[in-house]
């Protein structure tokens, strides 16, 4: 369940925002790419932006487990980004930077089944295919409960009402049910478990970078008298490393999929990130089919509405077998915002 469900075109037009989404390799209509990693994921975003004529800096959006790709964009293509909007962002639950309290606050919220799934992804990923084929790849994905049983470790009906009250009300809505059916069918249209396994492995493996690499900090000068003399003679200003743009994080305080302790960890590592804590909100409720919430998000990111974007000439993208990217409205793992 990906993208920003229920986001109205009129709101995009009011704020002058163009929303671009796409399928990850192996999902939807995108070709598989078995050698992909997080750096190649960031490169895909850059290629898509360039191919569609996005010359200005753009925002990236990360939701839940899809946030791993937004984190990668902050690391590998920071000069092209205006900022990042994160919603219940997932990080590697095995991250060595976590302290004992943070790790406990995350893992104790998860059931044995979910912990076991992460263990398999980290140690025996080939066995994940069996579990995926028993759930959403079985062709019997009519019940949202089946997916939540895999994600949360139990069926919705087993939750105490106060644990999932707002999320429960949302997923029982017919509008949400219709969206769920369409989104799942699109994401699994190739019927292959491999891309889902690849995603799970990416989540819990070495990312190739640390969240600490994104922290805004002064670049250390080389040691020695010669480096000091060179610094004063050049009159250079202080240089910084990390991501220079804004990072906004929205976190439901009743989220059982991405516990608030995970965002606490992110904020400790990236203290400049703006965290918006949402009391009584779950994993789905604030982002999904909430007009008021979407307006609040856009106002936070972009301020006063700027009106529609100017109409540009249609841009034709030449596709090759290696660079075949299908732009989707409904099935995507992360979204890119562009504003004037």
Image (cartoon, rainbow, N blue to C red):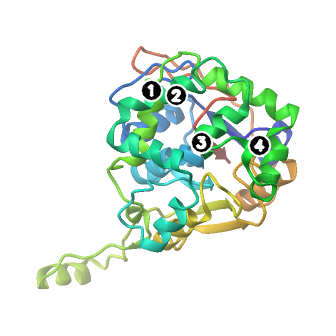
Please tell me the numbered disc located at residue 151. Answer: 3
Spatial distance from mark 1 to mark 2, Cα to Cα? Answer: 5 Å
Q: Nearer the viewer, residue 65 or 84?
A: 65
Please tell me the numbered disc located at residue 129. Answer: 1
Q: Quadrant of the N terminus?
A: top right
- Which x, y percent locates residue 206? 33, 50
* Dot 2 and dot 3 residues touching (CB under 8 Å): no
Which circle's residue, 2 or 3, is located before the other in the chain?
Answer: 2
Q: Which residue is mark 4?
A: 157
Q: Please name the residue shown 28% across and 75% down the image.
A: 220
Picture layout, residue 124 above or below residue 213: above
Give the class, few, some or many, for how many residues have Cα within 10 Å of label 2's Cα (few <14, many ≥20): some
Q: Which residue is mark 2?
A: 132
Spatial distance from mark 2 to mark 3, Cα to Cα? Answer: 11 Å
- Which x, y percent locates residue 70? 51, 48
Query: Dot 3 lies on which element?
Result: helix
Which circle's residue, 1 or 4, is located before the other in the chain?
Answer: 1
Q: Nearer the viewer, residue 74 or 149?
A: 149
User: Closer to the observer: label 1 or label 4?
Assistant: 4
Spatial distance from mark 3 to mark 1, Cα to Cα? Answer: 15 Å
- Which x, y percent locates residue 311? 74, 32
Q: Nearer the viewer, residue 256 or 87?
A: 256
Q: Is residue 289 visible?
A: no
Give the class, few, some or many, for how many residues have Cα within 10 Å of label 4's Cα (few <14, many ≥20): few
Spatial distance from mark 4 to mark 3, Cα to Cα? Answer: 14 Å
Q: Is residue 133 left or right of residue 87?
A: left
């Amino acid at each position: 369940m990906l993208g920003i469900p229920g986001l109205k075109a009129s709101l995009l037009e009011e704020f002058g925002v163009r929303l671009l989404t796409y399928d990850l390799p192996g999902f939807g209509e995108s070709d598989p790419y078995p050698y992909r990693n997080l750096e190649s994921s960031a490169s895909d975003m850059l290629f898509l932006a360039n191919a569609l004529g996005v010359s200005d800096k753009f925002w990236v959006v990360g939701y839940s487990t899809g946030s791993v790709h937004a984190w990668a964009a902050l690391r590998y293509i920071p000069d092209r980004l205006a900022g990042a909007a994160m919603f219940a962002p997932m990080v590697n639950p095995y991250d060595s930077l976590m302290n004992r309290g943070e790790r406990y606050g995350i893992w104790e919220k998860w059931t044995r089944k979910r912990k076991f799934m992460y263990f398999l992804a980290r140690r025996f990923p080939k066995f994940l295919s069996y579990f995926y084929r028993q759930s959403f790849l079985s062709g019997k994905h009519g019940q949202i409960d089946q997916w939540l049983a895999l994600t949360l470790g139990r069926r919705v009906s087993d939750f105490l009402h106060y644990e999932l009250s707002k999320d429960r009300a949302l997923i029982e809505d017919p509008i949400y049910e219709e969206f769920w059916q369409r989104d799942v069918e699109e994401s699994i249209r190739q019927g292959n478990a491999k891309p889902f396994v690849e995603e799970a492995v990416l989540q819990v493996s070495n990312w190739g970078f640390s969240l600490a690499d994104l922290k805004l900090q002064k670049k250390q000068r080389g040691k020695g008298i010669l480096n000091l003399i060179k610094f004063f003679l050049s009159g250079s200003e202080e240089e910084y490393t990390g991501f220079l743009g804004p990072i906004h994080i929205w976190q439901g305080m009743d989220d059982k999929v991405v516990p608030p302790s995970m965002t606490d960890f992110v904020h400790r590592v990236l203290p400049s990130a703006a965290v918006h804590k949402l009391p009584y909100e779950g994993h789905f409720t604030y982002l999904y089919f909430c007009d008021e919430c979407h307006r609040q998000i856009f106002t936070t990111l972009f301020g006063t509405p700027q009106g529609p974007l100017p109409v540009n000439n249609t841009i034709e993208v030449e596709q090759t077998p290696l660079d075949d990217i299908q732009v989707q409205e409904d099935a995507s793992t992360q979204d890119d915002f562009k504003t004037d």
